[in-house]
Image (cartoon, grey):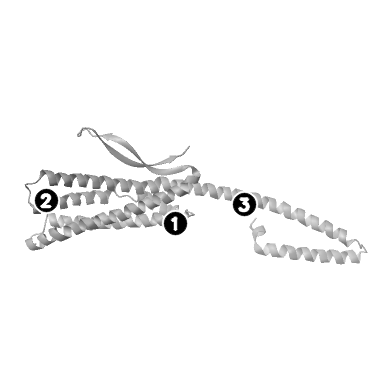
Amino acid sequence: MNIFQSKYFNVVLPVLFVLFLLLLLVYGCLIGIYDVITLAVNAVLMLLATLIAISLPLYASAKNEQKRRDKEHEMIYVSVSRYVGGEILDNVIEIQDILKNNEKSLGQLDKQNLSMSERDKKIVTASIWKTASEILVGSLQDKHHNNMVMSGLVAKIPDDAVGNGIRDTYQKMDNLKKRLKSITMFFGMLISPQVGVSKTFLDYQFNTKLQEGITAVELDIKIFSDSAEKTRKDINKLLKQYGKEIKIIAYEKVHNSEKGSRKTEKSSISSKK
């Protein structure tokens, strides 16, 4: 079927037809048939019938190929949203949960440990952030994304903006993980300094670099979270035509150690009926 779609074929076919008419004219003159116009009309009708016979299968094949591509695109959109989009949102939810725990712990530190020195409070603060950073480094996942990249599925997304957005979001997540790893080492040094480290040096680190490190982590978290939210919206724009969307659902989770309940979030893909 490819030969009929070639631009050379579209040029050669009319040329051959003109040559055929000339030969027909010469043939008609040689055999004494002067009604060449009738022969030419018949030849044109035969050519039209031939072109129609060729075009109909080509048209049907093109429609079937378009349907196949549309179905493939739908599968790609849904797969990317279910796995990659869900993974991105789960990472954001994990970050939000850790930050809420941090805020709660730091609030308790301010209220319940008024007898502690400022230095001790800063040590506890560093310890809280160190623990949170260690948890996040192990919790932030890119397994589904790596699998999609290796399979070539992400590269098949027709909308370049969405594909680039996904890659950019995971790059920002990778930057965040690097920041968390470095800040974990830094806070560890403050909490358990090596022998010989002067008090003056530690005081400077606690008074200036501690808060700078926390601010840097919070900034990288915001950059990643904003990118993740934009990517979610871009994916949903594509999914709307298939009646699906990726969203965050909430449910109540009761903790045995606490009275009442706490709202916990989880990403999900759903279909709109």
Residue 8 % position (x, y): 67, 64
User: Distance from label 3 to label 2 (Cα)?
Assistant: 70 Å
Give whichever of discs 3 and 2 has the lower sequence position: 3
Crowding at mark 3 (Cα within 10 Å: few <14, some 14-19, many 20+): few
Above or below: residue 217 compared with residue 242: below
Residue at screen point 26% across, 45% down: 97
Residue at screen point 25% across, 57% down: 179
Regarding residue 244, the answer to whether it shows in the image is: yes
Q: Is label 3 or label 2 in front?
A: 2
Q: Amino acid at mark 1?
A: Ala
Query: Residue 145: horizontal and vertical position, in percent?
Result: 38, 51
**Mark 2: secondary structure:** helix
Q: Amino acid at mark 2?
A: Lys
Q: Residue at (31%, 48%) from the top-left corner?
A: 92
**Badge 2: few (under 14), some or many (20 or more) residues near its Cα, within 10 Å?**
some
Q: Name the quadrant containing residue 47.
A: bottom right
Residue carrying label 3:
62
Q: What count of labels does the image hold?
A: 3
Residue at numbered disc 1: 161
